[in-house]
Amino acid sequence: MIGKIDHIGIAVANLDQTLKLYTDVLGMSLHGTETVADQKVKVAFLPLGDSELELLESTDPEGPIAKFIAAKGEGIQHIAFKVDNIEAALNEMRAKGIRLIDEKPRYGAGGAKIAFLHPKSTGGVLVELCQRD
Ligand code: ZN
């Protein structure tokens, strides 16, 4: 069911500043940025082989990324697994007793259909299921 790691989401306080680390120092290429109003984030995409890193800067002090940084500091916020059929994957997770944050998929960065599983059910890791058509 899980295809690959689609992306890793990293919470950053200052996107422009952190981007310099990933591009100038680590030598990765910036593939673009997008503001996702629904999640109150600005996202920078750094493709890396068959997956990518997504740097996430909050656009709102009440947004999930701002709250994450306030509680835990900057760092890895979630891991996204690629699935072919997100509705089927959510039904399977629900049937297996996994607590869902999103009962239904919503649209994330890059137009992907996404849904989060609750870290209390997944060993402390915020897991995102991600379907790209
Ligand atoms: Zn994500």
Image (tube, grey):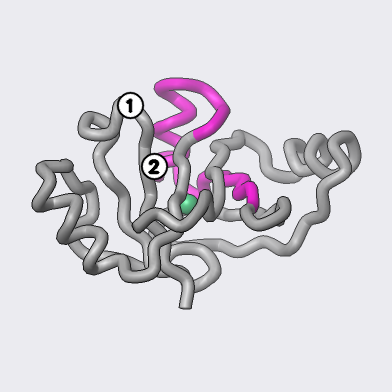
Q: Let me know if residue 41 appears in the view.
A: no
Residue 78 in picture, x, y percent from top left: 45, 40
Picture residue at 32% right of the left edge, 70% below the top: 85
Q: Quadrant of residue 103?
A: bottom left
Secondary structure of the residue carrying numbered label 1: loop
Q: Earlier in the sequence, mark 2 or mark 1?
A: 2
Mark 1 = which residue?
A: 124
Secondary structure of the residue carrying numbered label 2: helix
Query: 111 and 79: which one is in front?
Result: 79
Check disc 1: other Cα within 10 Å, few if <14, some if 14-19, many if 20+.
few
Residue 67 painted magenta: yes
Residue 24 painted magenta: no
Asked if residue 14 is positioned above or below residue 113 in the image, the reply reads above
Q: CA distance from mark 2 to mark 1?
A: 16 Å
Query: Identity of the amino acid at label 2?
Result: Pro
Query: 106 and 128: which one is in front?
Result: 128
Mark 2 = which residue?
A: 64
Q: Quadrant of residue 110?
A: bottom right
Residue 25 in picture, x, y percent from top left: 88, 34
Residue 84 in picture, x, y percent from top left: 39, 69
Question: What residue range appears in magenta?
Answer: 52-76
Picture residue at 27% right of the left edge, 45% below the top: 117
In this rendering, the label closer to the viewer, 2 or 1:
1
Query: Identity of the amino acid at label 1?
Result: Gly
The answer to whether the residue labelled 2 contacts the one labelled 1, judged by CB atoms less than 8 Å apart, is no
